[in-house]
């Protein structure tokens, strides 16, 4: 991949991924479209995080960001734990060397079958409701096992600047903070092993100041709730929410400021008050998002009433987020380029559209790109997270793309 991506700046060109020339990689995987993830960049991102975050803080990977088995296997030797959001992701995580006690299972609506699997495997269940807590206790009694649980807390504060709010106000996620003490009292005699709390308020935030404020509020809330816990807190997941730049005016997150804030919180607040707690920061997009590209090929170039369209063999059924249909209020272009073009290549303004029979299938709108023709490769950057598995792959019956870790 380009030097720009290797230094975690906004990408502008792409000649290779993982040291493999783009066209050669297309031949290697069997054609287009495909996703490619650079294992070297993933490793480097973990190194960057370790260099800034406190050594006493555990790093967890949110598997939902990219559950490709090869990616999860690679990360199993780099992070301290996994967080999963389905039984399928749990099976992927359990197939790695990561031990079950370092795997947590979050998300509303876990079925009895999923909970049974998690309890039998020894995975930590992050409880999203009183009903789920009762269900877990009953399953544990039936299996003769003691379920490992943590309470997911819907905090009584919101985090400004987050691309997707996951806490504060009414939420389908977690137990409202003011109702947690009541649930803790019920759990005390229910036969479960209550480890602690998971508090996650929002995702895709590029403001270090806002994230630091959220971390301070999260720790304060955890300390308050710990007073009602029947046992010392042994697990505290403070979430993540670290964003990556997608659009022209986005600035990369100031990781150093985040690390300094967490250093202070760990030394001055958490350790003196929760000495037994394993404190976890949970990241997904920040770990893998910038290490991936989506590559598709131009199959037609057409002019229509003054506009030029590049029609490609991929589209929103593989990369919903880049089409603007996955959380964007006002559609903006992801970073896109024509593969294997020089920095000084002549430009033309085009729209890149997919092969689906819907006007929503738009990968780039009125974007200056290197002049391209039929057969050229179009590269969508920042495609390492929430790509394939966050897209409607069955829409209109087109085949699924290949994924490659290189």
Image (tube, rainbow, N blue to C red):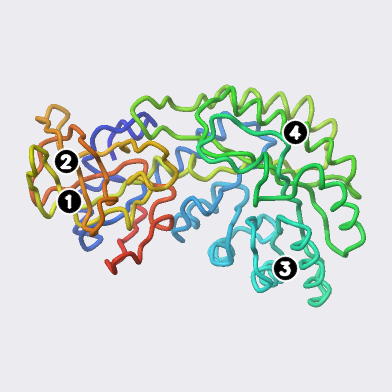
User: As rendered, which of 48 and 319 lies closer to the eye?
Assistant: 319
Q: In which image quadrant can residue 336 be found?
A: top left
Pointers 1 and 2 in contact (C-beta within 8 Å): yes
How packed is label 2: few (under 14 Cα within 10 Å), some, or many (20 or more)?
Answer: some
305 over 31 or under it: above or below:
above
215 over 177 or under it: above or below:
above
The nearer-to-camera label among 3 and 2 is 3
How far is disc 3 from disc 2 in space, using C-alphas? 49 Å
How far is disc 3 from disc 1 in space, using C-alphas? 46 Å
How far is disc 4 from disc 2 in space, using C-alphas? 47 Å
Element type where label 1 sits in the image: helix
How far is disc 1 from disc 2 in space, using C-alphas? 8 Å
Q: In which image quadrant can residue 265 be found?
A: top right
Pointers 4 and 2 in contact (C-beta within 8 Å): no
Which residue in the protein does label 1 denote?
Answer: 23
Q: Residue 219 bears which disc, if any?
A: 4
Residue at 82%, 35% in the rendered image: 223
């Amino acid at each position: 991949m380009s030097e720009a991506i290797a230094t975690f700046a906004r990408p502008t060109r792409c000649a290779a991924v993982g040291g493999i020339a783009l066209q050669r990689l297309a031949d290697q995987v069997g054609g287009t479209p495909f996703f490619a993830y650079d294992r070297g960049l993933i490793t480097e991102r973990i190194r960057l995080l370790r260099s800034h975050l406190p050594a006493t803080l555990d790093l967890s990977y949110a598997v939902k960001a990219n559950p490709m088995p090869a990616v999860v296997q690679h990360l199993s030797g780099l992070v301290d734990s996994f967080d999963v959001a389905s039984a399928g992701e749990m099976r992927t995580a359990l197939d790695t060397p990561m031990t079950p006690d370092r795997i947590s299972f979050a998300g509303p609506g876990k079925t009895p079958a999923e909970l049974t699997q998690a309890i039998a495997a020894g995975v930590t269940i992050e409880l999203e409701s009183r009903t789920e807590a009762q269900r877990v206790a009953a399953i544990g009694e039936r299996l003769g096992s003691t379920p490992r649980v943590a309470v997911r807390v819907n905090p009584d504060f919101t985090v400004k600047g987050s691309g997707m709010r996951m806490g504060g106000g009414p939420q389908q996620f977690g137990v409202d903070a003011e109702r947690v003490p009541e649930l803790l009292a019920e759990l005390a005699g229910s036969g479960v092993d209550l480890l602690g709390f998971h508090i996650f308020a929002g995702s895709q935030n590029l403001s270090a100041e806002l994230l630091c404020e959220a971390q301070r509020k999260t720790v304060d809330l955890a300390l308050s709730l710990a007073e009602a816990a029947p046992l010392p807190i042994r697990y505290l997941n403070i979430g993540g929410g670290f964003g990556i730049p997608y659009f022209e005016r986005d600035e990369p997150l100031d990781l150093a400021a985040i690390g300094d804030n967490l250093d202070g919180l760990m030394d001055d607040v958490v350790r003196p008050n929760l000495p037994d707690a394993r404190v976890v920061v949970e990241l997904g997009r920040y770990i893998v998002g910038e290490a991936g590209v989506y590559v598709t090929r131009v199959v037609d170039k057409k002019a229509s009433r003054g506009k030029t369209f590049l029609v490609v063999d991929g589209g929103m059924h593989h990369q919903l987020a880049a089409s603007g249909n996955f959380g964007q209020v006002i559609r903006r272009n992801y970073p896109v380029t024509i593969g294997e073009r020089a920095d000084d290549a002549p430009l033309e303004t085009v729209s890149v559209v997919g092969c689906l029979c819907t006007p929503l299938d738009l990968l780039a709108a009125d974007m200056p790109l290197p002049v391209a023709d039929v057969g050229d490769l179009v590269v969508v950057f920042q495609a390492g997270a929430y790509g394939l598995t966050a897209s409607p792959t069955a829409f209109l019956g087109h085949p699924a793309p290949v994924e490659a870790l290189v």
